[in-house]
Image (cartoon, rainbow, N blue to C red):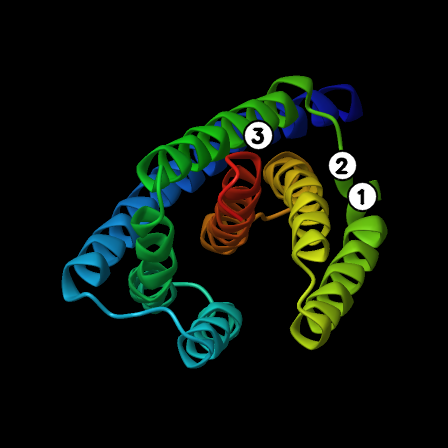
Amino acid sequence: MSQHTVPTRTVAADSALPRVVRNTYLLLAMVMAVAALGALLGLRSGIAWSMGMWLVFMVVFIGGPFAINAARRGDAAIWLTFLWAGLVGFLLSPMIAAYLAIPGGAAIVGNALTATAVLFAGLSGYALVSRRDFGFLRSFLVAGVIVVLLGIVALLVFQLPMLSVVISGMAVLLMSGFILYDTSRMIHEPGANPVYITVSLFANIVVLFSHLLNLMSFLGGDD
C-alpha cells in the first residue's frame, strides 16, 4: 500500500497547483481592472497630488491588506480586495496626473506601464516555469523594505533628488524579488490562498509602477 501512497499525494498536489495559479491570476486580472477603473475615475475628478493625499494613499495602501486578512477566507475578503484596489487606483491617480502634466508625461507613464507589465510577466513566469522555491529571499526582502523605508524618511527630511532616484532603483529591485517570492508561494506554500497572494502581487505591481514612473521621469530629463 505504501508504494502507491506517495504517487497519489503527488498527483493530488500537482492537480491542485493549476487551480491555485488559475484562480490567482484570474483574480489579479480582475483586481487590476478595478484599480484601472478607479484610476480613470480619479483622473476625471481632477484631484491634485499633495502630501496629504500621499498620506491618505499610504494609510489605505498599507491598511487594506490588514482588513482583508482580518476577513479571513470567503466572499468578504474578495469584495474587500476589490474595494481596496479601486481606492488604491483612485488615490494613485493624482500622482499619475502630475506625471502626465509634465512635458513628455504621456510617454513616461506609457513606458512605466510597459516596463511594469514586462517585468511582472517575466519574473512571475520564470518562477512558475522553473518551479524554484524563492522562500530563501524572505529575510533579504524584509531587510530591503526597512532600508527603503529609512531612505524615504531621509528623503522627506533632506529633499535630495538623487536620493529619490536611488530609492526608486532599490524599490524596483525589491519588488522584483517580491514578485518572485510571492509567485513561488503558489507552488510551494501548503494551502496557498489565491486572495492573499493576489493582494501581495497587486501591492508589488503598484509599488513597482510608482517607482518606475520616478525612474522614467529622471531618465527623460524631467526630474
Asked which secondary structure carries label 1, the reply is helix
Asked which secondary structure carries label 2, the reply is helix
Does residue 210 show up? yes
Does residue 71 show up? no
Residue at x 45%, y 36% (from the top left corner): 112
| Image x and y of residue 138, in percent | 79, 50
Rounded to the nearest whole Å, what is the CA distance between mark 1 and mark 2? 6 Å
Per the image, the residue denoted by label 1 is: 137
Image side of residue 181 versus residue 63, left or right? right
Residue at x 68%, y 19% (from the top left corner): 130
Q: Is residue 5 above or below residue 192?
A: above
Quarter placement of the N terminus: top right
Task: Determine whether label 1 and label 2 are within 8 Å by CB.
Answer: yes
Residue at x 63%, y 21% (from the top left corner): 126
| Image x and y of residue 171, in percent | 67, 49
Q: Is residue 29 above or below residue 125?
A: below
Instruction: Give the numbered dot on residue 134.
Output: 2
Label 3: how many Cα within 10 Å (few below 14, some 14–19, many 20+): many
Residue flagged by tag 1: what amino acid is it? Leu
Instruction: Give the numbered dot on residue 124.
Output: 3
Rounded to the nearest whole Å, what is the CA distance between mark 3 and mark 1? 15 Å
**Mark 1 or mark 3, which is nearer the start of the sequence?**
3
Residue at x 72%, y 56% (from the top left corner): 163
Residue flagged by tag 2: what amino acid is it? Phe
Residue flagged by tag 3: what amino acid is it? Ser
Label 1: how many Cα within 10 Å (few below 14, some 14–19, many 20+): few
| Image x and y of residue 180, in percent | 66, 36
Q: In this view, does 5 lie above or below 45?
A: above
Label 2: how many Cα within 10 Å (few below 14, some 14–19, many 20+): some
Task: Out of 116 and 20, give the one closest to the viewer.
Answer: 116
Task: Determine whether label 3 and label 2 are within 8 Å by CB.
Answer: no
- How many callouts does the rendering have? 3
